[in-house]
Image (cartoon, rainbow, N blue to C red):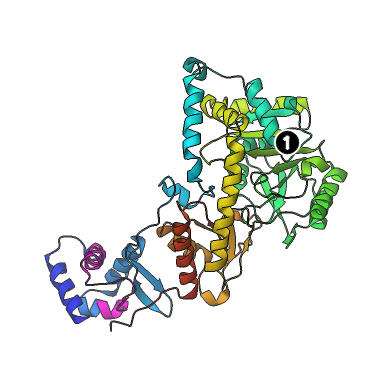
Amino acid sequence: MNALTNHWLKRLSESRKPAYLTIPDLIEEDLASGRLRPRDRLPGLRDLANALHLNYTTVARAYAEARKRGLLDARAGSGTFVRGRTQTLPIAGGGSVEMSMNMPPEPPQLAARLRESAASLFAGMDPFRLLRYQDFGGTSADRAAGRDWLRQCLPSCHEDTVLVCPGIHSVLVALLSQLVRTGETICLDALAYPGIKAIASQLGVRLQGLARDEDGPLPHVFEALCKAERPAAFYCNPTLQNPSTLTLSAGRREALVDVALRYNVPIIEDDAYGNLPQRSPAPLATLAPELTFYVTGLAKTVGAGLRIAYVSAPTVRQTQRIAGALRATTVMPNAFTAALATQWISDGIAHDMLSAIRGEANERQAIASQELAAWRYDAHQDGFHLWLPIPPQCDWSAPELALQLRNRGIGAVAGAAFSTDGNSPNAIRVCLGGPQDRDGCRQALKQIADMLEDPHQLHMPMM
């Protein structure tokens, strides 16, 4: 360590930067040169301050800056360790946002068919038609395709109550703006899709999280809320729930619907993952068609960039009201993506993509079961995310672990992002679809297992 501090003393004397900025630069340089290695232990703050003839505050600021740059890990009672700039795993698309988005894996065997189908569609189409304003809710062909896609889970839906929309998120904005007034309450699972939290906040809508057990939201808690304060709507993500991966049983669906029917509470059924499982209970919309707005889309079953969703409303009049709200917020669905979605549903590519994504999810879940065999987590074989509670002995907080994993290109989101009742679980959601291939998925899961097993994976101390 003396050699290192002597080197740093010399460089500090030559630098025109403040010492608290120079020290992180030196750590980075020494990592590149091999003078320091990832997992090496650095001196404590007072020891380094004495060795470099600096005050304690300056060294504390330097270590804080190095942590911000992702160069150091520091944990109470253990010390400060060099982490270095880890090589990130290849993420599909390469965008940083995908490190926290739950996207489906991309089946490479269908790439040529997707390309050929898209080229054929646009080659035979008047390009100016795609550049004009479109009928809101989609053309008759788009709506028919949407009806066909919906009927995989909702056999009773009709074309005159179906709208083609630019993504599920836009449908949820429209539904909340129509069903809930500012200051009113919607109830939902204590764990829920972060998008619904953001939308509610933007619209001034209150969220009331319902206590849950291993089967999902508790019907008696829902009923107690209805008695005390009739909620404006009940939001539910019943199949492969984001983040818990739970699929509500038929019995739990019936019990929740029974409460909604008795208190006349509209249901927003967000079934984004509904087509993924080969078998799942009937949607809530089949149990309470007069109350339920059923929403699904292609982002989780074909591709995240295909921003096309379909909503089935209880009546034609309600469909028209939702169309008005969507028109006010999004104007119209994108004509290019709507045409692609219709083409791919009609020629079978969408169904083949769904099948291939499901198959790839099965493979990646099998890898997860191997690499995370020592840890308890929740998952479904047909889904592409998992929910990992952090055991107390691991000495990680969920936000800290998620940050470290995201710095390595591993898609993880801390439980606080999903909490609707202020009780943030110490757990993370891990996305298996982001890595470009199974080897990348295995490598990511190995890193997660290693970090859970040994947060620092230490070398022998340098001092």
Residue 391 can be seen, yes or no:
yes
**Above or below, 197 relative to 325:** below
- Point 57% across, 35% down: residue: 349
**Above or below, 31 relative to 435:** below
Q: Identify the image quadrant of residue 248.
A: bottom right
Drawn side of residue 399 relative to residue 281, left or right: left
Drawn side of residue 279 relative to residue 89, left or right: right
Q: How many marks?
A: 1
Q: Which residue is mark 1?
A: 151
Q: Position of residue 418 (x, y in %)?
A: 60, 55
Question: Is residue 230 a member of the stretch shown in magenta?
Answer: no
User: In the picture, which quadrant includes the N terminus?
Assistant: bottom left
- Point 57% across, 75% down: residue: 392
**Above or below, 98 relative to 216:** above
Q: Position of residue 102 (x, y in %)?
A: 54, 50
Residue 168 can be seen, yes or no:
no
- Point 72% across, 33% down: residue: 312
Q: Identify the image quadrant of residue 340.
A: top right
The residue range painted magenta reads 21-48
User: In the picture, which quadrant includes the C terminus?
Assistant: bottom left
Q: Nearer the viewer, residue 54 or 453?
A: 453
